[in-house]
Image (cartoon, grey):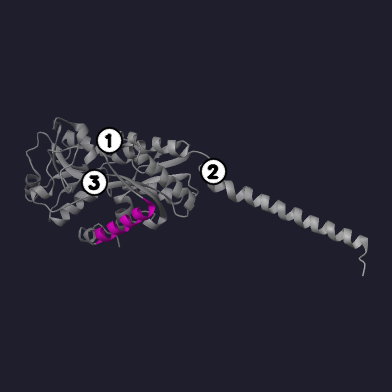
Amino acid sequence: MRRDPRYLRRKQMHLSKIRKTVCASLVALAALAGPAAAEFPEKPIKLVVPFGQGGATDQMARLIAPLMEKELGQPIVLINQPGAGGAVGLANLAHARPDGYTIGVGSDSTLAARPLMSKSGYTAESFATIARVVEIPSGVAVRSDSPYKSLGDLVAAMKTKDLTWSSSGIGSGPHLAMAVFLAQNGLKATYVNSNSGQEAMVKLLSGEVAFLSAGGSNFPPMLEDGKGDIRVLGLAAEKRWTYLPDVPTYKEQGFDYLRSQWFGLVAPAGTPDEAVAKMSAAVKGAVENPEFEKRLGTFYFNAAYQDPKTMRGQIEKEAAELKPVLEQAGLVQN
C-alpha cells in the first residue's frame, strides 16, 4: 500500500522539528549545568572574621587569604564583624546565601562551645565545614613586674585573693580555656571583658587586670630573648612550644590540663559540595605552600589542616567533651 506523498512530507517535517527541539534542549542544559560547577568562583569571595582586627582569628584570616586567592583566582575580601565572642559574625554568616561566595572563620570555641553556652543564633549544623587551618596552645601571662613567677603562684594567690583577668571576649577560646581551668581546679577570679586580644593585653599592661588568658601567638611579639613587658607563666600544651621553648607547660607545673585553639573556614549550610571541595583544596594547597610555612613563623601558628569531614568530627568530639565541663562551670544555658 502506497503512502500519500503529502503524508510522508508532513511526517518528515514533524520528526525534524522534534530533533531540533531535543538538540536545543540539550545545548541549553549543557550551558546551564556544565560550566557552572567548573567556573566557581566567578567573582570575589567575602570572608567574615567574627572578631576585631589584630587578634589571632584576624591574623589567621590575613595569613591564609592571599594564598587562597592564588589557588582560586579570585580576590578574597575580609569583613570584620566582632561581637559576643564571635557569635555576631557567625550568626550573620549562617543566614548568608549558601552559594560559596560568603564564608567565615570558625574556631574551637565558636563552633564547638559557643552554641552550648548561649543562644548564639546558630549551631554547628548551621555551617558546612571547609577546612581547619592552624592551631596554637592556650596560655596565661602576667606583667613582668608581677609577684607571680609561676602558674602555681597564680593559683595559690587566687585561693586567697580576688584577682581580675581578661581575654579576647566572653565565649572566645582564651576565655573558655581559663574558665574551664578555673572550674576544674575550684578557683574563682573576676573576669573583665575585652573585645579583642589586643584590648585585653592593654588591660594587662595598664594594671587593670592581674593576668591574661590568650592564645600562644599573642605572647612572642611582646618578648625579646624571653624578656619584655609580660611574663608567660605556662602553656596548656602537650610539650614545650617551639616559639616559646623556655615556657613550661601546665603539666610540668602539676596541672593536668591541655587546651589548644584552632581556626578553620566554614560556609553556610547548603553551600554546594563542589564549592566546598574547591575551597578546601585551595586551603590544602595554601598550607602546603612553602610561603605559608614561612609566614607561620611570623604569626606564631602551627599548621593543622583538616578536610571537611575530619573538621566536622573534631567539632563534634570537642562539643561532647566540653559539655559536661561547661555545665559544671555554670556556662551552659538551658
Q: Return the x and y of residue 212 as percentages of the image width and height.
A: 18, 41
Give the residue at mark 1.
Answer: 299
Q: Is residue 314 magenta?
A: yes
Q: Return the x and y of residue 150 as percentages of the image width and height.
A: 8, 43
Front one among 77 and 198: 77
Front one among 33 and 321: 33
Front one among 34 and 267: 34
Q: Is residue 279 shown left or right of residue 30?
A: left
Q: Quadrant of residue 83?
A: top left
Mark 2 against mark 1, which lies toward the viewer?
2
Q: Is residue 118 magenta?
A: no
Comes first in the chain, label 3 or label 1: 3
172 versus 71 height, above or below:
below
Give the residue at mark 3.
Answer: 174
Quadrant of the rendering where the C terminus is positioned: bottom left
Amino acid type, mark 3: Pro
Q: Is residue 200 shown left or right of residue 103?
A: left
Comes first in the chain, label 2 or label 3: 2
Amino acid type, mark 1: Phe
Residue occupying the far bottom of the picture: 1
What is the distance, in whole Å, between disc 3 and disc 1 at their CAs? 17 Å
Quadrant of the rendering where the N terminus is positioned: bottom right
Q: Which mark identifies residue 39?
A: 2
What is the distance, in whole Å, between disc 2 and disc 1 at their CAs? 33 Å
Mark 2 against mark 3, which lies toward the viewer?
2
Is disc 3 placed on a helix, strand or loop? Answer: helix
Amino acid type, mark 2: Glu
Comes first in the chain, label 2 or label 1: 2
Mark 3 against mark 1, which lies toward the viewer?
1
Q: Return the x and y of residue 231 as percentages of the image width and height.
A: 13, 36
* Image point (9%, 37%), residue name: 146
The span shown in magenta is 307-323
